[in-house]
Image: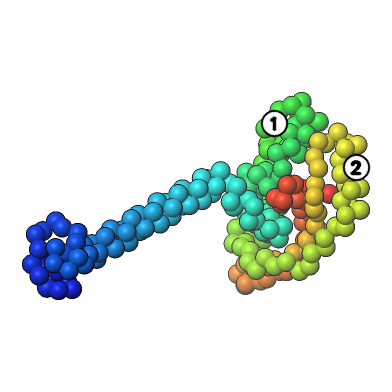
Amino acid sequence: MQCPKCGKETASGLDFCTECGSRINEGKDEKKNKTGKKRIIAVVMLAVIAVCAVMYLTGSLTSSARTAEDVAIEGIEAYLEFDHDTTYSLFPETYTIWIADKYYGGDRDGFKEMLEGKADENRRTFEAKYGSSLSYSDITVVSTREYSASEISDLNEDFEGMGLDIAIDGAKKIKLKYTLTYLTKDDLKAEETVNTTSFVISIGGKWYLFDE
């Protein structure tokens, strides 16, 4: 091995030149340090990805990022697609349990079955009015009214009086509109704009659909 400073040939494996005392393997050590740093960064990145994956799978990441308007729009989509499972998932679990205890003798599937029946009824109503060509588009938030602190306090008192063990930290009434497109009996394309309102509440910073 040749010393990079004085050029003298030295035995391989030495860290310093026997002639001038300069370090011979400095570049190699630097390369080792860089490799070590890269390995540490890779491990940290893998750990972050793993944590995010767990949060996503458990719903904590997606739920916390979902806004009140997102929930309202998702509720309208579920209504128009007759998707009772999604509608059910948008309600807070505490509320579905309360409904089950109050109206279905503790049967937690009772509320879900009611939503399923309502979805089937809506499907028949839509098909009778618009036929099988019906589709929807352009779900848009028109306005949002955020409830004041005093209104939220009143709601929590009402819930407590109903025996509903739920404490909300926010509430919004969201007006939306969407477009229905269908074919008339003469096979002509027709469009209809529909306005509706959704009521959503926040529990622990997460938004849910709710019956006002």
Which callout, 2 or 1, points at the residue further toward the start of the chain? Answer: 1
Name which residue lies at 70% across and 67% down: 140
Specify whether residue 162 is in view: yes
Name which residue lies at 73% across and 33% down: 97
Q: How is the image coloured?
A: rainbow
Answer few, some or many: residues within 10 Å of disc 2's Cα (few below 14, many 20 plus, some between 14 and 19): some
* Quadrant holding the N terminus: bottom left
The residues bearing labels 2 and 1 have C-alpha atoms spaced at a distance of 25 Å
Q: Residue furthest top?
A: 105
The image position of residue 29, as x and y in percent, is 26, 60
Q: Which mark is residue 108?
A: 1
Most foreground residue, 111 or 61:
61
The image position of residue 84, as x and y in percent, is 65, 45
Specify whether residue 120 is in view: no
Most foreground residue, 183 or 101:
101
Q: Which residue is mark 2?
A: 157
